[in-house]
Amino acid sequence: MSVEPAAAPTRAARGKRCGNVTPPERPAGTCRPPALPARPPDELPRAALRTPSPAGEALALAVRPGPARLGRPLAEGGRPACSPSLPVPPRRAGPRSAACAPQAWAGGAGGAEIPPAALWRGALRGRRAAAPPPSRRLAGVCLAAAAGGALRCPALPRRARRPAMDWQVLTRELSLYLENQVRVGLFGSGVGLSLVLGFGVAYACYYLSSIAKKPQLVASNDRFCRFLEEHCPVVTETYYPTIWCWEGRVQTLLRPFITSRPQVQYRNELIKTADGGQISLDWFDNNGSLHYPDASTRPTVLLLPGLTGTSKESYILHMIHQSEMLGYRCVVFNNRGIAGEELLTPRTYCAANTEDLEAVIHHVHSLHPSAPFMAAGVSMGGMLLLNYLGKTGRDTPLMAAAIFSAGWNVFESVESLEKPLNWLLFNYYLTTCLQSSISRHRQMLEQLFDMDLVMKARTVREFDKQFTSVMFGYPTIDDYYEDASPCRKLKSVGIPVLCLNSVDDVFSPGHAIPVEAAKQNANVALVLTSCGGHIGFLEGIWPRKCTYMDRVFKQFVQAVFEHGNKIFSM
């Protein structure tokens, strides 16, 4: 059934006319606009045939539907109070086909109205159920009208006006819509969760296959290997580095900040040297030991810190804490001028000169000759201890030794530290620490050295060239580095030594570790991990209390003191 066209409306009557359809169900008093000639669908305005886009749907949120905007038949001036958000497109061919239906905001194929609240909820859920069907493609034409503005019917394009837009409301509602679309479309659909789970599974597979590995145990003596497997099983267990910081540089940098610092009460002792200098020793007597109440037979561990380290370093404190639980006594050897004592002679220390270490070992042994005695060195302290053992052989009061993160070849170590990233992270900082350790003794050292030139050094190599090698009488820095490298003395070690290194240690690169030389000495065992960095060896989700290095130290020291007869009969 078709609708007959009415006569053209007059200018005075247009205030009450808004379309060419008067729904028969309208109450009395509402406008009954005359019917205008209906346009076929193919002659609709171009904007009316445009497919609604997500942006167009979002713009519909700019004006919130409510009782004051939808459902009012008339507004002031006799105009119908159509929604200022969306001009409804003409319906399909039928008895009520029209260019505008001001009272049906987004009707379906049968012309039924969609309640404003339902349309609002559908938009927030990111659904398009409330959007006009393909037969009503006018979405996005005038979706962002002002809150109180009136919308003229698109059936009158010549008289149509563009309503003012509330851009603040539009921006806010569009942002909310887009955020909701991302949340619903990504995580609500399960895509985001799938991505997270997939990445987690891939990372776990990579970690278990390439990161978490058993350490490599290198030893030529089968009895030494069996002794370690039986009494120090940690060297054969899989090392699981901290899953979020397994890389060597990261472990090296984070260890001082992550690990705890156990409280330790020291007893300080200053001993004199043959050249008139003095050395500071920090004792932890452990007088409350339940396992060894007799101080004369209480096992003693001599600890040697790193290049600029003292008894306050966190790794030294952890070793003392482990020894305390086992009932042992500890003494920390602080290099000259490092621990706050005055420098009495213009001499400090280096990795090649073992005179001070020999004096300390004989002093400690003379105080407790009946007590079992061993030593543990870290970083440069391990290099110094290895050079001492390579020099003395079996002629030492030490029963055994443990070495951690020692630099085996000084040439390779310095070359590695001079790479751009390593220089930025470690070399420059280490050089400044060396300069700070001697600056407080400047008045004493200026007698023999050009301190201004020494303080201008920017690398460890420059510092050693201007200061260390000159102090100990080496003709060149290469001569000093060759004498300081423990790899050249490893074959002369005469007591059991366990050495722990990580192959990703930038201070001691993996290719510089003397694996072949260790195989030629029955007293040496190397434990090489794939990760751990330099004195890092962090493990666990939050590695604050104990590291892999601490466990190796504890088990090996306990094995030596309590089962030493098995290892010494090799």
Image (cartoon, grey):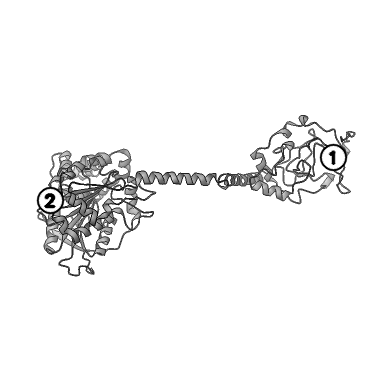
Q: Residue drawn at (64%, 48%), measured in percent from left and top?
A: 125
Nearer the camera: disc 1 or disc 2: 2
How many dots with numbers? 2
Q: What amino acid is labelled 1 in the image?
A: Val
Residue under label 1, please give it. Answer: 21
Q: Is residue 81 left or right of residue 170?
A: right
The residue nearer to you, when weighing 309 against 378, is 378
Q: Quadrant of residue 205?
A: top left
Measuring from the top left, give residue 204's x and y in whole percent. 41, 46
Residue under label 2, please give it. Answer: 494
Residue reaching furthest to the top: 43
Q: For label 1, count other residues whose C-alpha is less than 10 Å away and answer few (under 14), some (14-19) or many (20+).
A: many
Decide if residue 293 is in sight here: yes
Q: Residue drawn at (90%, 33%), measured in percent from left and top?
A: 7
Decide if residue 349 is in sight here: no
Measuring from the top left, give residue 208's x and y in whole percent. 37, 46
Q: What amino acid is labelled 2 in the image?
A: Gly
Pointers 1 and 2 in contact (C-beta within 8 Å): no
Q: In the rendered view, would you say 5 is above or below 442?
A: above
Q: Residue drawn at (29%, 38%), measured in percent from left and top?
A: 419
Q: Is residue 37 left or right of residue 123?
A: right
The residue nearer to you, when weighing 335 against 91, is 91
Measuring from the top left, give residue 338's x and y in whole percent. 22, 54
The residue nearer to you, when weighing 407 against 75, is 407
Measuring from the top left, give residue 514's x and y in whole percent. 20, 42
Q: Is residue 541 left or right of residue 304?
A: right
Q: Is residue 566 left or right of residue 42?
A: left
Q: Quadrant of residue 454?
A: top left
